[in-house]
């Protein structure tokens, strides 16, 4: 849909400054693009290519390697229901069927109001809490179908406020103080330990 | 095959029970091949970094820790290594890898263009399973998608070997195709709506080990088993080695051949696809003379009509004889000849200088450098120039645009070998960030910047800016070349300035310790032309005037006119017959106005060419010539490397080889050049030209790398007085004009696949200059110089230094030659909004 807006451009430039090689900022910038639009737009990838000095083909190559970067618009909330072994045994399949029925979409689809995208996923590493799901990668554990309905209702009415829209990694953006940046020296050219390591060795606060 | 190891301490490797010596650093796959065991492979390519993608080259290797399967393309030979390429385990691995590769590969070989020359097909036959066990659905993609104008990608057939993508990013530096998605969905593709716009894309088709990449000019034209192939040389300044493939007397494909000395198997798309012009219907097929409306020969007629060779030759002979009677040999001039083979050039030089007796002969159209300088300056081979620890000074047109395979070799050396590169060009070249230091002198001041660089290398660092280049940059460049043997890639970077600044710069750079030159002259065989004496003041073999060569009736003693001199003499009425041998001064001479007046004023213009280009259309007598792949001979590249041009197909109509036309014309003038075959011409060259002494036609043809002619002779090029610098006023920009790969050249425009790739002419400016003039991207401006004015759109480009304006030559829309006065050293322009 769009290139970075003015605010995000400033953020993007600060992200690029963290790395000795601009290209290293590719993945954080793809996250930023996904945060801005809810998905990674082609124009955003072209913009990232300009910012880090690679071709758009290289950006799209990186982006498409990762399933969690969406290249097409998805719902405000992406609901991933696990149907791998533990969840399967403890009702994951039933939960998915219930979700499909109650949301009115098949796994992989997005509701007409653009609020929910439902996905059937493999193990999300919470087997002790099966059946489980993620909403925008925030976990919900040991769900019954009622729990699911309550979750959806809460998101729909705005009662649940701890789940930001799709693409937001964290509400608090990573901040790195200038004196703890790795510096603008490429690893192969470095002659001394990075500043943060020196700071840790000196007994400073770990990062 | 890549950087050849030189150390003598060899390593013992046991291959299938037999011990051989591998070279240090040699990859196992190469070492085995060198010793007669071919290991099957898909992703490994000797000219690219090994990646171990396809696993086809798995062999059983024991390095002392027990036998294990290892990819031989990723394994460097080590002492005592034991390798089994025939063992059960190896065979099972090969069989298994092929079965995996074939899981998603369609079995559409009967309708696939690659069928018959497909490594996957061949290796499946040799090493793979007899039949498929796979009953599931294969993956499907949209059938071929164009990744650019000429290359099609069929993703179903792709085996993800990473050859094309590696070539794009590593060799060509255009990473516009990339792996996308992952796992079984991985595919090669471009960014949406951004094509694989690379000048070298055709190479990916050649190295694709399956039928995934195909080239439009060849798609479905022939089956590999119907093709006949000869090894030849592409007549470009690098002398790229090629294979010319034809079927039923039509050239259908050109592929690169790996010559370690030159192109390493690569070609530019322009060269690769230029075969389309060979069989173009507009080729000249019969001689043309003046005639009446009914098509009968009539000297008073206004039309050009078909005539027999006898009539056309008789007319040409009579015209030349009359001119000789009236004005002596100086009334005749021969312009062009860079398209020709060495043998044809020699025949034309002998015709002009011995039979006609004129020294008014020039193969360059005032767009090159003095022949005596090119012939006498020290040279170095490309491999020596790019040896680790060397330095290169680039002082020519952008090699990416004009000398494609040189560009690829420079890119490789800059990335993989310890070499430095200093640019002494008016604008940044396509090498971009690989360039060590970019000095971009103000046009016309290359000489003073080169002088400052030479002084700085000697220790006298500049204290102030020189010629628009900062003192710091010159010092950095001096550091970059200091203590290294320097090779200067020297040519005319811009035709909007005269040759003198470049000549000054070359003379200065020659003083650098260990300096040698590679002259980047435009046009196919300019170097052969100079060596064969198609230049004023030179006789065959890089020899000056004076003695009469053996077997020649006579030779001129006074240096004749160069291209510009001939055109001026024609305008003044001193030159009455101008013979154009494969040259188009109306389109190519930097001063278009002078060329046009000269051709109009000249009594008779005789043209020998392949196509009726602008100049041919205004000629009085036209001879159709046999062109590339239609005539045999030899070619000389910019190193002085002679390699064979092989005949493959029949010339159209009654077109004749250029050396035959020269012989025929000599007969009309009552002389016999004494040639009955190309070999006989070559034999005479060897006896006449000291630079070629000892060569033989058979030897040249036998060596894939050709043969080097002997270096500089006693010929001396006295460096002229340095040209005075013309100051640039604050309101003007200084014009730079150069050539681009795709333009309106006759050859490109007669290749349907490339004709529409040439962009329209634009004025490229530094974005700050564009802002200052209030001219945004695409806005139309009027460019005015002392000589004329043109109107064209603006393109802001940060690669252009401030104060310069770049307009490409030979593009549609506007012709920058209208701005150029051939007497001026530089061309200053004013830009006004239209």
Image: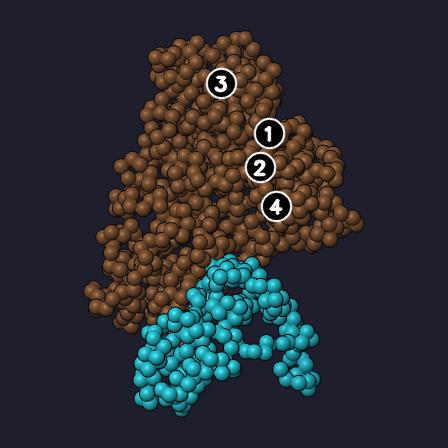
**Residue on which disc 1 sits:** B818
Q: Answer whether labels 2 and 1 touch (C-beta < 8 Å).
A: no
What's the CA distance linking mark 1 and mark 3? 23 Å
Residue at 53 percent of width and 26 percent of height: B585
Which chain is mark 4 on? B
Q: Tell which tag, 2 or 1, sits nearer the viewer.
A: 2
**Label ID, residue B776:** 4
Which chain is mark 3 on? B
First-in-chain label (1 vs 3): 3
Q: How far across and down, in percent of the image, does residue B481 sit?
A: 66, 52
First-in-chain label (2 vs 3): 3
Q: Tell which tag, 4 or 1, sits nearer the viewer.
A: 4
Residue at 59 percent of width and 39 percent of height: B780
First-in-chain label (4 vs 3): 3
The quadrant in which residue B61 appears is bottom left
How many C-alpha atoms fall within 10 Å of the one at disc 1: few (<14), some, or many (≥20)?
some
Residue B104 appears in the figure? yes
**Residue on which disc 2 sits:** B792
Q: How far across and down, in percent of the image, does residue B45 sit?
A: 41, 58
**Chain letter matching colour cyan:** A
Q: Answer whether labels 4 and 3 touch (C-beta < 8 Å).
A: no
**Residue on which disc 3 sits:** B605
Residue at 55 percent of width and 26 percent of height: B362
In the displayed structure, would residue B742 be above or below residue B339? Answer: below
How many C-alpha atoms fall within 10 Å of the one at disc 2: few (<14), some, or many (≥20)?
many
First-in-chain label (2 vs 1): 2
First-in-chain label (4 vs 2): 4
Label 3 secondary element: strand
The quadrant in which residue B576 appears is top right
In the displayed structure, would residue B638 be above or below residue B214? Answer: above
């Amino acid at each position: 849909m769009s290139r970075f807006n003015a605010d995000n451009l400033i953020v993007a430039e600060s992200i690029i400054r963290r790395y000795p090689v601009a290209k290293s900022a590719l993945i954080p910038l793809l996250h930023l693009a996904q945060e801005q639009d809810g998905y990674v737009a082609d124009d955003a990838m072209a913009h990232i290519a300009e910012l880090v000095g690679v071709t758009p083909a290289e950006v799209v190559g990186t982006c498409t390697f990762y399933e969690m970067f969406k290249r097409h618009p998805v719902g405000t909330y992406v609901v991933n229901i696990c149907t791998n072994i533990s969840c399967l045994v403890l009702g994951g399949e039933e939960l998915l069927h219930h979700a499909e029925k109650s949301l009115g979409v098949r796994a992989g689809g997005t509701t007409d109001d653009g609020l929910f995208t439902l996905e059937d996923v493999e193990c999300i590493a919470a087997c002790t809490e099966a059946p489980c799901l993620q909403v925008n990668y925030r976990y919900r554990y040991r769900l019954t179908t009622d729990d699911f309905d309550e979750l959806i209702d809460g998101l729909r009415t705005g009662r649940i406020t701890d789940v930001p829209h799709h693409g937001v990694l964290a509400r608090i953006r990573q901040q790195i103080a200038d004196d703890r940046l790795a510096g603008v020296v490429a690893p192969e050219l470095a002659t001394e330990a990075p500043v943060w390591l020196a700071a840790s060795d000196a007994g400073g606060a770990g990062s | 095959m890549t950087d050849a190891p030189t150390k003598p301490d060899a390593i013992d490797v046991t291959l299938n029970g037999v011990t051989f010596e591998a070279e240090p650093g040699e990859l196992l796959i190469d070492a085995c091949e060198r010793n007669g065991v071919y290991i099957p492979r898909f992703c490994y390519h000797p000219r690219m970094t090994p990646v171990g993608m396809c696993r086809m080259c798995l062999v059983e290797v024991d390095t002392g820790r027990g036998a294990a399967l290892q990819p031989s393309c990723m394994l460097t030979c080590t002492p005592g290594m034991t390798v089994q390429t025939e063992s059960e385990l190896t065979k099972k691995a090969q069989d298994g890898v092929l079965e995996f590769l074939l899981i998603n590969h369609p079995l559409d070989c009967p309708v696939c263009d690659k069928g018959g020359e497909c490594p996957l097909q061949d290796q499946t036959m040799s090493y793979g399973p007899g039949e498929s066990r796979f009953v599931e659905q294969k993956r499907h993609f949209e059938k071929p998608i164009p990744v650019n104008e000429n290359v099609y990608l069929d993703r179903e057939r792709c085996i993800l070997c990473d050859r094309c993508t590696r070539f794009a990013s590593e060799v060509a530096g255009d990473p516009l195709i990339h792996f996308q998605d992952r796992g079984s969905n991985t595919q090669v593709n471009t960014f949406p709506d951004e094509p694989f716009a690379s000048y070298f894309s055709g190479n990916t088709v050649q190295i694709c080990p399956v039928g995934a990449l195909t080239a439009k000019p060849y798609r479905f034209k022939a089956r590999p088993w119907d093709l006949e192939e000869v090894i030849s040389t592409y007549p470009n300044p690098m002398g790229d080695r090629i294979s010319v493939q034809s079927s039923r007397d039509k050239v259908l494909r050109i592929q690169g051949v790996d010559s370690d000395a030159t192109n390493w198997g690569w070609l530019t798309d322009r060269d690769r696809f230029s075969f389309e012009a060979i069989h173009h219907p507009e080729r000249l097929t019969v001689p043309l003379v003046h005639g009446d409306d009914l098509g009968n020969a009539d000297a008073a007629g206004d039309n050009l009509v078909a005539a027999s060779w006898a009539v056309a030759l008789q007319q040409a002979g009579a015209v030349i004889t009359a001119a000789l009677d009236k004005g002596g040999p100086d009334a005749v001039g021969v312009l062009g000849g860079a398209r020709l083979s060495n043998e044809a050039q020699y025949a034309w030089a002998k015709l002009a200088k011995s039979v006609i007796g004129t020294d008014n002969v020039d193969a360059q159209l005032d767009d090159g450098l003095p022949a005596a300088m090119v012939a006498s300056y020290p040279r170095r081979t490309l491999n020596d120039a790019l040896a680790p620890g060397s330095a290169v000074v680039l002082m020519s047109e952008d090699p990416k645009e004009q000398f494609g395979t040189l560009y690829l070799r420079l890119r490789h050396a800059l990335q993989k070998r310890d070499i430095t590169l200093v640019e002494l060009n008016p604008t940044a070249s396509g090498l971009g960030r690989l360039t060590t230091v970019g000095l971009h002198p103000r046009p016309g001041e290359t000489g003073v910047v080169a002088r400052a660089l030479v002084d700085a290398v000697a220790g006298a660092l500049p204290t102030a800016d020189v010629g628009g280049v900062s003192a710091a940059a010159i010092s950095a460049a001096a550091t970059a070349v200091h203590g290294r043997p320097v090779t200067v890639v020297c040519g005319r970077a811009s035709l909007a300035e005269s040759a003198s600044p470049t000549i000054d710069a070359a003379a200065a750079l020659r003083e650098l310790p260990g300096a040698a030159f590679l002259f980047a002259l435009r046009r196919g065989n300019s170097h052969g032309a100079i060596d064969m004496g198609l230049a004023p003041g030179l006789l065959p073999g890089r020899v000056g005037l004076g003695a009469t060569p053996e077997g020649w009736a006579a030779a001129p003693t006074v240096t004749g006119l160069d291209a510009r001199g001939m055109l001026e003499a024609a305008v003044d009425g001193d030159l009455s017959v101008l013979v154009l041998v494969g040259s188009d001064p109306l389109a190519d001479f930097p001063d278009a106005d002078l060329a046009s007046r000269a051709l109009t004023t000249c009594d008779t213009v005789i043209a020998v060419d392949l196509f009726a280009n602008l100049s041919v259309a205004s000629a009085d007598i036209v001879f159709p010539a046999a062109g590339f792949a239609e005539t045999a001979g030899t070619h000389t590249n910019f190193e002085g490397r002679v390699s064979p041009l092989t005949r493959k197909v029949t010339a159209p109509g009654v077109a004749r080889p250029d050396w035959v036309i020269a012989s025929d014309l000599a007969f009309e003038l009552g002389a016999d050049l004494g040639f009955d075959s190309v070999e006989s011409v070559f034999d005479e060259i060897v006896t006449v030209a000291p630079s070629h002494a000892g060569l033989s036609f058979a030897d040249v043809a036998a060596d894939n790398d050709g043969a080097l002619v002997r270096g500089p002779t006693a010929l001396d090029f006295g460096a002229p007085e340095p040209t005075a610098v013309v100051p640039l006023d604050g309101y003007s920009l200084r014009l730079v004009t150069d050539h681009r790969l795709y333009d309106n050249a006759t050859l490109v425009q007669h290749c349907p696949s490339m004709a529409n790739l040439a962009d329209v002419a634009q004025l490229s400016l530094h974005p700050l200059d564009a802002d200052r003039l209030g001219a945004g991207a695409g806005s139309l401006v009027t460019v005015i110089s002392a000589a004329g004015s043109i109107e064209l759109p603006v393109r802001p480009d940060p690669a252009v230094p401030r104060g310069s304006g770049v307009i490409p030559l030979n593009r549609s829309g506007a012709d920058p030659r209208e701005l150029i006065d051939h007497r001026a050293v530089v061309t200053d322009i004013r830009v006004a909004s239209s």
